Image: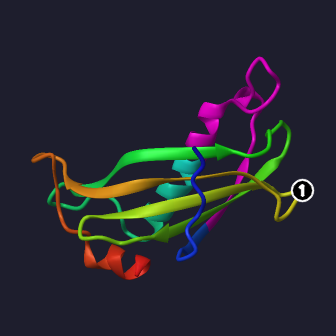
Amino acid sequence: MRFDLPDEKKLTHEMIIPMRWGDMDAMGHINNTIYFRYMESVRLEWLFKVGGATDAQGNGPVIVNAFCNFIRQLKYPGDLLAKHYVANPGRTSFDTYLTLERTDAPGVICASGGAKTVWVNYAAEKSVPLPESVRALIA
């Protein structure tokens, strides 16, 4: 199953990620699990930059699903340009989408993926409304 980025999305963040020697697997390419780590790093950097960390009441983000389309193999060495998008703000959730491209091949997408983020109260383990500050960045 392939998930494409929606037409209605908002670019919110870009980040350069160096591929590391240890990111490769026995097949000589970046291991599939590392793509999720790259996407997590970009998503968290954006969330912390915009004030989306856990608040004093113990409310914050939780990822409820994540996906990745492996379009082209990534091989060490090199750097990646990760682009982070947001879409579909709901009462308690929003979607994030990401693309990964090598900096030495601009515009050539090697992977695309994303995740649904739900705002929760960690102690109660229940969803809560998105903070207005976060909603304003997504809408």
Residue beneath disc 1: 104
Residue at horizontal 65 percent and vertical 33 percent from the top: 32
Query: For this view, does 84 lie left or right of residue 57?
Result: right
* Screen quadrant of the C terminus: bottom left
In this view of the protein, which residue sits in the foreground, 101 or 133? 101
Q: Is residue 116 above or below residue 76?
A: below
Residue at horizontal 75 percent and vertical 41 percent from the top: 19
Would you identify the image quadrant in which residue 107 lies? bottom right
Query: For this view, does 86 lie left or right of residue 62?
Result: right
Tell me where the magenta segment starts and ends, as one range. Answer: 14-38
For the view shown, which residue lies furthest in the front direction? 1
Horizontal and vertical percent for residue 128? Answer: 17, 62
Residue at horizontal 49 percent and vertical 69 percent from the top: 86
Horizontal and vertical percent for residue 135? Answer: 33, 77
For the view shown, which residue lies furthest in the left direction? 124
Amino acid carrying mark 1 in the image: Asp
Residue at horizontal 63 percent and vertical 41 percent from the top: 35
Query: For this view, does 109 lie left or right of residue 44?
Result: right
Horizontal and vertical percent for residue 8? Answer: 53, 77
Would you identify the image quadrant in which residue 117 lies? bottom left
Q: Is residue 134 above or below residue 121?
A: below
Query: For this view, does 91 lie left or right of residue 18?
Result: left
User: Is 77 within the magenta?
Assistant: no
Would you identify the image quadrant in which residue 88 lies? bottom left
* Screen quadrant of the N terminus: top right
Colour scheme of the rendered structure? rainbow
